[in-house]
Image (spheres, rainbow, N blue to C red):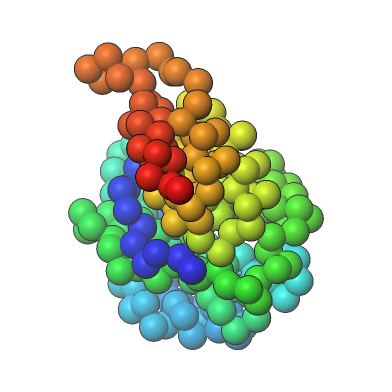
Amino acid sequence: MAKRNLGTRGGLATMAVAILALSAGCGGGGGGGSEPGTVAEFLRAQSLPMMQAPQVTNVGDDAELFSVAFGEAEDCPSGCVYSGGIGLRRGGKVGWLRFDDLRKVDDSGTPLYDLDDSDAALFAPGFRESLRALRDEPRGPFGGHYEAFLDLLARDSETPGDILAGLVDGLSEANYLRARLLVNNPAVRADRGLLVRLANLPVQPPVHDGRDLFQDVREQAAAAAALLP
C-alpha cells in the first residue's frame, strides 16, 4: 500500500513538470476537458486552478496514463513552466504518480496511486516496457510516466520482491531519490537480502561534506539489517 505523501520535491518532479509545460504550450489555462471514466472524476475532485485540458492515453490492461498542467505560467521569459501532475488509472482506481504544485512547498497528502493485490497486470514486465516506449517518444506528454512508475514501485510495500531487487540492482547516481524510497519501503526493511544489497551500493563521488549520494542509504540499510533476527 502506498504512503500518501509525495515527500521531497526534487529535480525529477521539476523535470516532469517542465516536459508537461512544453507539451501544453504557453497559453493561458483552459477548461478541464471531458476525459472518459474516473480520470475526469478524479481531476474534478482535485479542484486544480486554471486546469488545462488533460492528455490521456490507453496502455496495458484496462489502464490509462494522464498528464495535466494547471495554474499560472512561471518563468515565461525563459520558457513557461506550469504546475502539473502525471497519473495512472487502472479499473476503478486512479491516482497521481508525480505531482508538483509550484505554489506549495509541501505536497503532503496528495493522493498517490495505491498498489494492491488487484494490480498484478501492472507488475508484469510488458507494462513497464509500454511505459519505457512512451518515454522514448521525443517531446511526448507521457515521457515522465516510466520513471515515476518505477518510483511508485520503489515506494510501495505491495511491490513483489523480485521487482524490488531489480530496482535495487538498477540504481545509478541519477537514482538517489529512488534509493531513499527503497530503503524506507517496509517490504525492503523486512528483507535482509535487499537491505544487504542497498548497504553495498557503490560509492559515488562526494557531493556534500565528503559524503556521497548513497552514503545515508547504505548506513540506513546496514542499520535496518542489523535489527532483523
Percent coordinates x, y for residue 42 in the rendering: 47, 80
Q: Is residue 208 left or right of residue 161?
A: left
Residue 14 image-quadrant placement: top left
Q: 58 or 160, which lies in front?
A: 160
Q: 33 or 4, which lies in front?
A: 4
Percent coordinates x, y for residue 19 in the rendering: 49, 46
Q: Is residue 3 left or right of residue 8?
A: right
Q: Is residue 132 left or right of residue 41?
A: right
Residue 216 image-quadrant placement: top left
In the image, residue 134 above or below residue 199: below
In the image, residue 20 above or below residue 87: above
Q: Residue at x 65, y 81 (%)?
A: 91
Q: Residue at x 65, y 76 (%)?
A: 118
Percent coordinates x, y for residue 147 in the rendering: 56, 46
Specify the farthest residue to the front.
229
Percent coordinates x, y for residue 172 in the rendering: 53, 28
Q: Residue at x 35, y 37 (%)?
A: 223
Specify the farthest residue to the right.
126
Mark count: 0
Residue 20 appears in the rendering: no
In the image, residue 142 above or below residue 57: above
Q: Residue at x 53, y 75 (%)?
A: 94
Residue 36 appears in the rendering: yes
